[in-house]
Image (spheres, grey):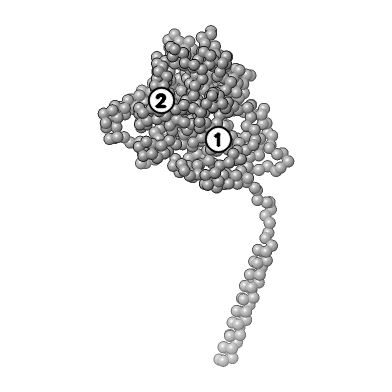
Amino acid sequence: MLVRMNTLSTSRRHAITSSRLFSAQLSKSAKTKRATKVQSSNPQMAFPCLDRLEQKSKILSNACVSEDFVNSLESGPEPSYSKVRTGFHLFHSKDPIFFDNGGFLPEYEIAYETWGKLNEAKDNIILIHTGLSASSHAKSQPRNGKSGWWEEFIGSKKFIDTDKYFVICTNVLGGCYGSTGPASKDPADNEHYATRFPIITVNDMVRAQRHLIHKVFGASKIHASVGASMGGMQSLAYAFEFPDEVEKVVSISGCARSHPYSIALRHCQRQVLMSDPNWNRGFYYNSVPPHVGMKLAREIATVTYRSGPEWEYRFGRGRADPLRPPALCPDFLVETYLDHAGEKFCLEYDANSLLYVLKAMDLFDLGLTNRSRAFKTRTENEKKYINGNFFDDIDQSVPAHPYKEKVEKATITPEESYEDLKMGISRIAHKDILVVGVESDILFPVWQQREIANVLKDNSKGGDIRYFELGTDVSNYGHDTFLLSLDHIGPPVKEFLEGIK
């Protein structure tokens, strides 16, 4: 018995010793592998574009931004179309303004600039309406000597002749270059409006402009309402709202109603911006702004501003550095251009203003049904405000339950929608209107400008309805043609404004 126990004890001792030796060998093997790390088949790719964004966020968190963050790549032939903080006049309205979709501003400011001289009769005013992200600085003037975004279009003996006309350009309500917008302070609590700012429409914007013209200049009528892109929407909307207060209308690369394709493109821009965690549901003021979302949104937009043939000629399939291996960061010349365009814009424009103005473009529709509903909503709210019960039943909140997705056909046929537009736009069919279309435009396809002209002509009530179209044989600049092909856009505009047949 004792011999057996000693035998077992010896066996156990051998087993323990063997186990310890094996563990030691494993440990030594692991240390050896860690010391001589096995390389992967290929090296890790570098991402300088992401490093740059991370570095920008760190510096923005310290409230210190350097111009070095804008790439040095030349952007091309684009005119000045950037941030303007000074050099404009401010119109402060202490009268409230009520909006098409509910909500109001108790008071507001509109930034504006002027060129030329207002005549004694006050009937030589031309109101210039801006595109999405433009400021009131359409042309240089004593208070701001920098070139404006329509510098060569406006001036003495130019297409809009300041020897004859008194030209006014405003920053739209909802914008961020002087006019009241989401970044402004709510007088009720002195906090930024942010996403407490009401949803605004293009028609709301022009009503604020008209109030400025009446109050500041004492004019009851303007000679012409002129604009391109979203400005083309505004030019029509101004005439629609005040048909007896405008003589002529010029709409360049615009539309009479937003169509699904354009709405879808702007939806994508809003989604990438709102997905930036720094957006914080609109309350990012005094903290890091959603610069990544803004950059990506602008890159999407820039794709729609130009045409494929123009980029083929300008960039081709060229790469920024053909001697380096391909990368996932900007590599092709067209990619570096988009990267530059997004980088330049991301801190120049307020993110919330971009969301609100994009939505205003989506909501644009001069059809009878839409404008009748908007008029009813607005006038009812104004009556409630006057009677002192405006806040009793107001509800601007989003529904408690998400919208249910419906996969089905449109409830209104294209033919019915067209007839509704005809009935709505008949309100201005007696006016003198010039519509300019651009065949290479993919953001506002040329058929949308043809639609404006056709609807007006179908409703003809004696107005001088003109349609002018630039084909791809003339310009391949796409939507930006109104900024770049001035020698082609300008002559028909000048002839129309001056009554030349």
Q: Residue furthest right?
A: 323
Image quarter for residue 404?
Answer: top left
360 to 66, vertically: above or below: above
Residue 76, visible in the rendered structure: yes
Could you tell me which residue is drawn at 62 percent across and 46 percent down? 47
Q: Position of residue 351 (x, y in %)?
A: 49, 37
462, 76: nearer the viewer: 76
Q: How crowded is mark 1: few (under 14 residues within 10 Å), some or many (20 or more)?
A: many
The quadrant in which the N terminus is found is: bottom right
The circle on residue 208 is: 2
**Residue depicted at x 40% and y 35%:** 197
Q: Is 48 left or right of 127, judged from the image as shown?
A: right
Q: Which residue occupies the foreground of this view, 336 or 287?
A: 287
Q: Nearest the camera: 22 or 472? A: 472
Q: Nearer the viewer, residue 330 or 3?
A: 330
| Residue designated by label 1 | 345
Q: Is residue 383 left or right of residue 136?
A: left
User: Where's residue 441, x and y in %?
Assistant: 56, 24
**First reached walking from the N terminus: tag 1 or tag 2:** 2
The percent position of residue 64, horizontal first and vertical second, equals 54, 44
| Res. 470 in view | no
Q: In this view, does 261 lie to the left or right of 11?
A: left
Badge 1 amino acid:
Phe
Q: Which amino acid does label 2 sit on?
A: Ala
What distance separates the C-alpha of mark 1 from that of mark 2? 26 Å
Report x, y in % for residue 314. 66, 29
Helix or strand or loop: what does disc 1 sit on? Answer: helix
State which quadrant residue 483 falls in: top right
Residue 195, picture quadrant: top left
